[in-house]
Image (tube, rainbow, N blue to C red):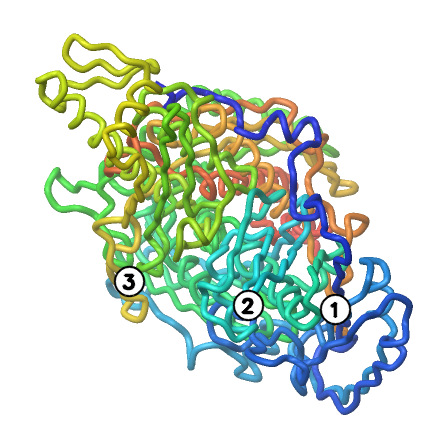
Amino acid sequence: MSVASPLPHDAAHLHVTGAARYVDDTPMPAGTLHLAFGLSAVASGTITALNLETVRSAPGVVAVLTAADLPFANDVSPSAHDEPLLAMGSVHYMGQPIFAVIATSHLEARFAARQGHMDITETTPIFSIEDALQANARFEDGPRIYARGDAAGALDTAENTVSGVFHIGGQEHFYLEGQAALALPGEDGDMHIISSTQHPTEIQHKVAEAIGLPMHAVRVETRRMGGGFGGKESQGNALAVACAVAARLTGKPCKMRYDRDDDMIITGKRHDFRIDYDVGFDDAGLITALDVRHYTRCGWAMDLSLPVADRAMLHADNGYWLPNIRIESHRLRTNTQSATAFRGFGGPQGMLGMERIVDHVAAELGLEPLLVRQRNFYASGGGISGQKKQTTPYGQEVDDFILDGLVEQLRNSADYDARRTEIDAWNAANPALKKGIALTPVKFGISFTLTHLNQAGALVHVYADGSIHLNHGGTEMGQGLFQKVAQVAASRFGVAMDVIKITATDTAKVPNTSATAASSGSDLNGMAVKAACDTIRIRMADHLAELHQCAPDAVVFADGRVQAGTADYSFGEVAALIHQARISLSATGFYKTPDIEWDRIKGHGRPFFYFAYGAAVTEVVVDTLTGENRILRADILHDAGASLNPALDTGQVEGGYVQGAGWLTTEELVWDAAGRLRTHAPSTYKIPACGDRPDIFNVALWDGENHAETIYKSKAVGEPPLMLGISAFYALSDAVSACGSNYPDLQAPATAEALLGAMHRARGDV
């Protein structure tokens, strides 16, 4: 059976040989034109004049487009129609596209785009969370509030209370392949778009609006991305729309790719947060009351900020039972890049904030943080006295809770207690180098919170020679989705993997797809492919059963053979037989996630089909003289259910941890006083490199299966592992705590500068 086998990525051989084809590798027809944007040099203002004659006369320039030149919709927003492709009258962040250059080469377009003269009357920009609050610059009329119990009353009567303010930085996606798109005009206005996107249907929708045609006139194709991480869910709209408009105008193929610095300046990042909290707890560390305020910096346009901020609220509990809780969320408008989806989609920020609260409670009581975490866990399996189910603050029953057992297993396998003792001894003996260790849990909800997105379609063809053509609405961005889904198809037909052909995601084959996001790729598309395969297999079995006078369910598909009664066929022979009998060997499949419902205004319902769990132990060392630090060891136990592919899932866990640790340690976004992003290149923005991974890196998958009816009882494994990196942050906080008796109040990211500041706070000398 192909499912559960640790098979390599379907394109692994193409990746390592350089033969994998990305958008920029696509062979171009003769005469292909290239685009670049002219960008705003101010963060906020009104455009009073545009002098683009120098641009138009630059070498290779074919045409220059402004908002006034766009024939139909000037909108690339995924939500509120508040994000024009090209600025109309006003600019809202430094780096906003104002005009587009169409030229005969990429370099000519990029050079010309720098020649424009723009007169902009500057207005006072809003950059910080504090400025946005003062100006009441926000999305939605006011804060969104979710609550359960009486947080205020419980705070008044709590044995102990503590308050804090926690700043969490954003994060650049830094996908290896930058944003790119290609538009190939066809006959009668048709447009074929090749895009590096997680959401081909949205590209189709926005392009159709921009060229004034129905969606059926636009075909969007995505074979693969060189990474996405949420940054290609909505941010690719601008390139695809610009190329389509230019192709419609010129009648020629048009291509656009961002250079890395343009990519970082133009596109949105992970939302940065400020989290204020007041928490009440007893002397044992049991939390009895929590009032938490999320302040989310959204940037200039709405993009996906509302669901991101919602999900942060939905993960404000992490793995903890909180009887009295109030969560208040402010979605603030600023003159910066429109923040967008990023792996975890708000969940990491909410979860990090909760872990900060637990860590602060432990410090206030002088208790081991792991002990406080375990004391506050939801009950095993969610049950109270085996009857009443514990619920999240938004009313969903937690009936699959396994963190108690998972954490205990990891605690033992990682030798946590002995290492804690050794680290305490080390810190007592070493004044300059301090070590720290932390074990943090993950409880992450799986499903889109916009309920209608929880659906998927698939198209499966079995050819007369027994080969199988597979297509579905999910996109491949390196995570191994195509391989996993192909394993599902191979298992349903009982054939070898080399029988399956995985083809590019294509809106002409599977329509109305959801983004490959929210860790939903395998869950949704795996079930859709299963449904399509089963339809064909049932047709095969019914025909063979009639031929050989046996029951259809007695027909066995296994090891590339098909047995019906005493007859034994190869799968190819059966395919030929079915074709000769004039029975269809093609089927569509459809799946919608069951048992979910959500009212985001009330903050109540069952937004998630199930929860994925995990935990990580991280050990670090910090130089107290410089703030330089290293991750020495990481031990991870992650819940992937009954894994579809343990090798791919383990890779996702490893990569997710490193990306999460990078977000919270070295990756710092810095804007200057004018709103200019200063960290706009690899030279100024530090992602983790190979040397930053732990020297000792132990990763294991939890031995269990999903209680929910998912594809082969597996669990999503795209986003949850990122939050395992939270343990690195709290290990650093633990190391800094060894410098003094005060709570260090470490802020994120824990750069060397932040660590030095936390050391001073721990010592009490600031």
User: In the visual, does 351 lie left or right of 628?
Assistant: left
Q: Residue at x 58, y 59 (%)?
A: 167
Residue 37, labelled with which disc?
1
Percent of width and height locating residue 509: 42, 49
Find the distance from the CA under tag 3 to the CA under tag 1.
Answer: 55 Å
Residue 159 against residue 634 in the figure, above or below: below
User: In the visual, does 729 lie left or right of 51?
Assistant: left
203 and 733: which is toward the camera: 203
Secondary structure category for the residue under label 3: helix
Residue that numbered label 3 is attached to: 154
Q: Residue at x 78, y 42 (%)?
A: 626
Camera-side mark, 3 or 1 = 1
Find the distance from the CA under tag 1 to the CA under tag 2.
Answer: 28 Å
Camera-side mark, 1 or 2 = 2
Residue that numbered label 2 is attached to: 188
Identify the image quadrant of residue 460. Answer: top left
Identify the image quadrant of residue 493. Answer: top left
Percent of width and height locating residue 637: 44, 28
